[in-house]
Image: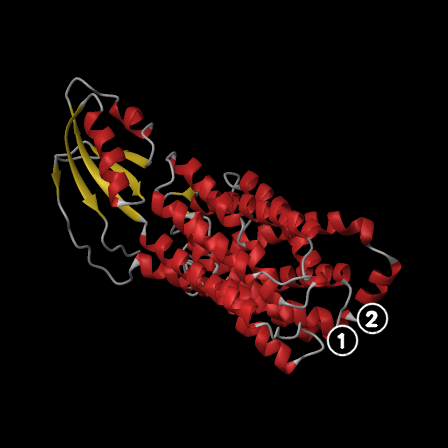
């Protein structure tokens, strides 16, 4: 077995773009929650009315943005203003039949998680207490990643996930803010709903709808948001009272410009998140996205200083702040370790003349994402998600080499990647 290391050249590093997308999504998420709490507490202090107004205003804003970005920039109408934002985007379009089921399930579970989100934010004025508990979805997403690539977790992955989870628990330690019953609901329905929704969003984003093109993030955001809003509104119908209807009729036109602030932050966070899902593991995206937990602390400090009647006051307990700082260290270290643990590679395989059906055998090996038949000296190109060098050498590559019918193989680990 021969192994060659080749340095790929290009214009944009895929991994850098991936980190930027996931990190920026987390930053916008923190500002989205901050503005949600502010607008809710000051202008529309009814969780049902605020949720319905914010979500449907978000859908209308997304639709308007996509219509604007659909303006063509060439005569063939194969490029538009939105193509610069997402290369797969041409114009507003109905979802492909290949991704309809994934969109429906993603929107449904996102609706469940969103319903719980507004329940939690309306019960607390401390966004640093709200944001950490959403990160429980990391554990569910890691399980989803393992199912997708059919492999077992590595030690570094388990340690990173535990560090992030332990860190967000420490950051969220605020006595009396979130009770045990609400915590159980958040961990199961919010965390679980987010994880299942992200799982199906990732499937939809990675699905090839035409040769060389996957679903674009803008149309994906629009249709998932429509399904999300319909399911969330359905869940809220038993709580819609005449008071809620009157608030929406009389108060909404007055505060619409304030409501656009969290709508814009949420839109940016969601679209960048979907793009990151198309470039990396779900658990890695969510792990880097956990920077929102760290930002929740300074944002809440700023909010309590500028708007003391809206945000929870700053705790004078030094021990509590020490615990939170330790939590930040755990979250950051877990994010860095999780991001650095991901490796990808390709294996060129030459099969024996008497073994024509080697593709199916190789695809059944855990950790192999894709097997392609190619021309030239080598017969097969195998895409491998190598989540650590040790895991690759000890398991995946050895299993490929020992597969009956493999005559020779050559391994190429990806050092840098552009798209």
Residue 120 seen: yes
**Residue 66: x and y, percent?**
54, 61
- In the picture, measured across the screen, residue 251 lies left or right of residue 365, that is right
- 2 and 1 marks in contact (CB < 8 Å): yes
Q: Is residue 60 above or below residue 372?
A: below
Q: Nearer the viewer, residue 231 or 373?
A: 231
Please, which residue is most extreme toward the bottom here? Answer: 306
Q: Residue at x 31, y 25 (%)?
A: 360
Q: Residue at x 73, y 74 (%)?
A: 42
Q: Quadrant of residue 417?
A: bottom left
- In the picture, measured across the screen, residue 332 lies left or right of residue 316, that is left
Local packing at callout 2 (Cα closer than 10 Å; few below 14, some 14-19, many 20+) is: few
Q: Quadrant of residue 345?
A: top left
Q: Nearer the viewer, residue 138 or 72?
A: 138
Colouring mode (rainbow / by chain / secondary structure / one colour) = secondary structure
Q: Nearer the viewer, residue 259 or 337?
A: 337
**Residue 401: x and y, percent?**
19, 29
Residue at image mark 1: 254
Please, which residue is most extreme toward the top here? Answer: 354
Q: Secondary structure at mark 2?
A: helix
Q: Residue at x 22, y 53 (%)?
A: 415
The label number, if any, that marks residue 250 in the structure image: 2
Q: Is residue 99 above or below residue 337?
A: above
**Residue 350: x and y, percent?**
16, 30
């Amino acid at each position: 077995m021969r192994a060659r290391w080749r340095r790929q050249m290009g214009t944009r590093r895929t991994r850098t773009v991936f980190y930027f997308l996931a990190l920026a999504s987390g930053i916008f998420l923190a500002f989205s929650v901050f503005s949600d709490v502010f607008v809710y507490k000051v202008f529309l202090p009814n969780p049902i009315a605020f949720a319905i107004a914010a979500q449907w205003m978000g859908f209308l804003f997304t639709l308007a943005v996509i219509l604007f970005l659909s303006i063509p920039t060439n005569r063939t109408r194969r490029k538009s203003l939105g193509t610069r934002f997402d290369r797969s985007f041409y114009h507003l379009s109905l979802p492909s039949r290949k991704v309809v089921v994934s969109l429906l399930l993603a929107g449904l579970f996102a609706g469940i998680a969103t319903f719980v989100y507004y329940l939690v934010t309306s019960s607390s004025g401390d966004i640093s207490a709200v944001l950490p508990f959403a990160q429980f979805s990391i554990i569910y997403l890691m399980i989803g990643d393992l199912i997708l690539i059919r492999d077992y977790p590595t030690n570094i992955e388990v340690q990173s996930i535990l560090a992030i989870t332990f860190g967000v628990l420490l950051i969220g330690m605020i006595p009396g803010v979130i009770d045990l019953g609400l915590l159980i609901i958040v961990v199961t329905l919010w965390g679980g709903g987010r994880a299942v929704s992200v799982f199906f969003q990732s499937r939809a984003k990675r699905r090839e709808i035409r040769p060389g093109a996957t679903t674009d993030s803008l149309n994906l955001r629009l249709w998932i948001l429509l399904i999300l809003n319909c399911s969330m509104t359905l869940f809220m119908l038993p709580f819609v009272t005449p008071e809620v209807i009157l608030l929406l009729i009389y108060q909404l036109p007055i505060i619409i410009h304030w409501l656009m602030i969290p709508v814009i932050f949420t839109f940016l966070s969601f679209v960048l998140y979907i793009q990151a899902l198309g470039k990396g593991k779900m658990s890695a995206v969510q792990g880097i996205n956990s920077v929102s937990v760290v930002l929740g602390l300074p944002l809440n400090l700023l909010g309590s200083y500028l708007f003391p009647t809206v945000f929870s006051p700053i705790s004078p307990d030094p021990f509590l702040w020490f615990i939170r700082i330790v939590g930040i260290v755990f979250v950051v270290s877990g994010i860095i370790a999780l991001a650095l643990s991901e490796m990808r590679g390709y294996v060129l395989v030459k099969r024996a003349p008497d073994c024509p059906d080697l593709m199916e055998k190789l695809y059944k090996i855990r950790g192999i994402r894709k097997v392609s038949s190619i021309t030239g000296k080598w017969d097969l190109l195998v895409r491998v998600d190598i989540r650590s060098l040790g895991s690759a050498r000890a398991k995946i590559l050895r299993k490929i080499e020992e597969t009956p019918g493999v005559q020779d193989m050559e391994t190429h680990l990806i050092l840098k990647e552009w798209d």
